[in-house]
Every structure is written in structure tokens, then in C-alpha cells.
Image: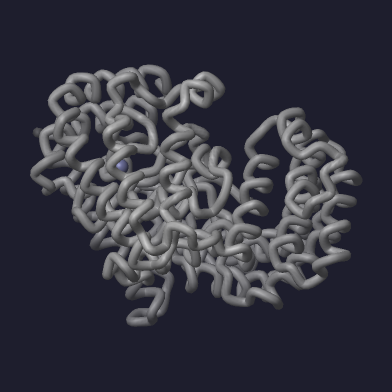
Amino acid sequence: MTVLHLIIRLCTIIACAFATTLPARAQSVLRDAETEALFKDAIKPILVAAKIDPKSAQVVLLSDTDINAGTSFQDIGINAGTILAADDINQVIGVMAHETGHMAGGHSSLRDGITKGATGISLLSLVLGAAAVAAGAGDLGIALITGGQTAAYNDALISSQIVESQADQAGMSYLNKAGISGKGYIAFFEKLQSQEYRNAVTRDAFSTDHPLTTDRIASLQERVQKSPAFNTPIDPTLNDRFLRIKAKLAGFIFEPERTFNLYPEKDQSDQAHYARAYAWHKSSQPEKSKAELNWLLTRYPKDPYYLETKGQLLMEGGLVQEALQPLRTAVQIKPDDPLILMEFGQALVATEDTTVLVEARKVLEKSVRLDPDDPFAWLQLGTVYDKLGDTPRTALASAERYRLTGELRRALGSAKTALAGLPRESPEWIRAQDIQVLTEEELKKKKRRGRG
Ligand SMILES: [Zn+2]
């Protein structure tokens, strides 16, 4: 589990059945190689059933602990809270199927007729809200976002019920086509509906008029029971992977005390060891954290994610040299995983050993080639170029990073510096020029919008 950075473009995520009345908000994406790999495998049959190219859509984990999910064009965002609340992978797949229903139905598109009014109104205040948040007035920002939403919400309620029901029906068809039982889907709905559960969550993301109605569940229930896949058991391999990432996420997000309650020391399951590795780490007990991971690695010495976690926690604990070996092995096992490559590169940089800079450059260049949208990887790569005295490439890496974090003026400045130093017509020179052109256009657009 690594760095929380990217901000998802706020205006395109719309409210969903899985909880909140806020249609859109700034979201941090929680990057984790293991979680992303599971999401990819879990949603694939759903996307195929929906006739969406699995390569064109992606599922990201959002750091929000509310139980929610949303769609944004070709992306589905699933909140950490949803993973932590789900009991099995089929419940998560149910959420994914529902979100795919929104995606296929074009509900996340601003051009969509049904949601246009509501999205339009809240968008306006979201811009204000986002600006306020950016200016450091966090609470004010949230108030502005909520205010706009309340105004739009009443009008949108009826149409959102239609949209939700459409997504339910579509989601159920995908599950049927994919031969996955909808039992998990229903179970998750019922769980959300139960008063007991709602009282248990600290921040109740539901509103009383939320369109998660008994009617809606009843009509789904009927379809689920009629489905030939009704009694198809859960895929045990996929479910084991789910239990692992759920435990890891709990360890990463919760206070250690809560993690130890959920995964007490008498629990000797793999996932409990995994969760406790994070909890000990967060309790500043590096030896105990390492012992949990060593327990796992004795049994699964070639597991790339246990190796990755060990390296990452060692690195965070300041034991950079010791972190290199597990990360290097993880890269050997998963040579095309951009996140693991990034972490290995980061560890190499952190050694402050100049003899590994060339290796670090190679590793990080591969990481950004595989995933050019990770600002943190660009930051690491920029650091390496800088240490190697390569000023134009340092500037280009900064331009890439600022482009991703929305710092357009800085992106433009860095792109110009890169252009001045890079060999004309080289691929990097062309890339710097692209960033310059795109950023200038974006800035012009912003200026026009500012004038109203
Ligand atoms: Zn929905």
C-alpha cells in the first residue's frame, strides 16, 4: 500500500447508490499494486458482459472510508470503506457490476439528460469548493460543495432513483452473463440498509431519503433468485486475494488498536499476519512488523506483494539498505508492475548511493513508461536526473509531474526549460513541446472560464 496522491477530477464522479448524497468530491486515489491487480481480474468478466473493452476501463481504490463507489467516464472508483465493509469478493463484484451499469448507461457523462440538472448545479459549487479547498479553507470548501448539492438534490431525487434502478438492472444482467451469483450484491445492499450497520459507521454517508429502497432490493432479489448463477459458489482464489487486500487495507487505514481487535494475535490466518504487519509498523514496533511478514514469507517466499510490503515498511522505518533486497526480488517476480518498480526506484534513490543512480534511472524510466500518470514516480525520476546532472530531463520530469497535479503554470515553465536543453526533434523534445501546447490551451480555457 503506497502513497495517496492523485486527485480524481472531481466533477465527473456522480453520486451512487452505495452511499453518499454528495455527487462528487475531491478524491485521493490509494495506489496499491496488489489491490489494483485484484480489481482488474475481478471486474474483467463484468466488463466483457457489458461489451466494454477491459483494457479501456480501470478500477481505482479511493482512500475515502465512507461506503461508496462512483464512476467517471471509463473509471470506476471504489472507496476503501466499501472494501472494509464487504465480507467477500462477490459483494465487491456486485458493486462493480452496478457501477459498470452506470458507465454503460452513460450516467457519469455530463451530457446525460437525466442527471444534467443536478450535476450542473453541483458542479458550479464544486468549482468554488475545490478552489476553497485548494486555498486551504478545507471546511469552507466542504460547506460550499454540500450547499450546492442540497439545492440540486431534491429535484434530482426522482431521476436518480431511475438511474440507480437502471444501473441495478444492467449490473444484474452482467452478473448473469458472467455466471456470477448476485447473492453478494443483495447481501451488500441489505447490509447497508440495516440500521444496525448504519449506526455502527461513524460517518453515516446515507441520507434518509436515499434511494436505497425496499422496493429496489425486492426487485433485485427476484432477479437474483431466478438467475441460473444463483447457487454458483464464490471463486475461492479470488476471495482469498480479497481477504488479503481487505486485511492490508484495514492495517493501513485503521488505528492499530482497531486492527488488533479485528485481527487479534490468536488469529493465525495469512490475512491476520498481513494486517498486523501494518498495525505493528504504525505502533512503531518494526521488529514485530518484520516478524509478521517473515512468517508470511517463510510460507510464501516468492509472493511479490509480501516482499513489496516488507520492503516498503522497512523503507518507511528508515532501513533503506535492508529494504532493497525484498523490493529487488519483488521486481524480478513482477517486472512489469509500475508501482513495484516505482517503489524499488524510490528505495534506490533513498540510499543516497551515487553508484546505484543509473540503475534507479532505468527502473524509474520503465515505471513511468508503464504508467505515465503517476506523479510520484515522476518526482523520483526527476530526482535521479537531477542527481545525474541532467537538467533538461529533470525539467521534463517536473513538467510531467505538474501536469498531473494540475499545477499548470509550473508545468509550462518546466516544459520550456526542458525544450531549451533537449536535442531538437528527440522524443523527449517532442514530449516537452506537447506538454507546452496542451498546458497553454488549458490555461487559456481556464482564463476564459474565469471571465465567465
Ligand atoms: Zn449507483
The image quadrant of residue 364 is bottom right
Quarter occupied by the C terminus: top left
In the picture, measured across the screen, residue 115 lies left or right of residue 206, that is left
Q: Position of residue 89 (x, y in %)?
A: 54, 54
Q: Position of residue 126 (x, y in %)?
A: 26, 31
Residue extending farthest to the front is 226
Q: Position of residue 394 (x, y in %)?
A: 51, 63
Q: Position of residue 419 (x, y in %)?
A: 36, 68
The residue sitting at 80% across, 56% down in the picture is 320
In the picture, measured across the screen, residue 237 lies left or right of residue 290, that is left
The residue sitting at 46% across, 26% down in the picture is 194
| For residue 209, above or below residue 180 | above
Quadrant of the rendered image holding ligand 1:
top left
The residue sitting at 88% across, 65% down in the picture is 298
The residue sitting at 69% across, 62% down in the picture is 305
| For residue 189, above or below residue 151 | below
In the picture, measured across the screen, residue 413 lies left or right of residue 439, that is right
The image quadrant of residue 144 is top left
In the picture, measured across the screen, residue 237 lies left or right of residue 74, that is right
Between residue 101 and residue 370, name the one nearer to us.
Answer: 101
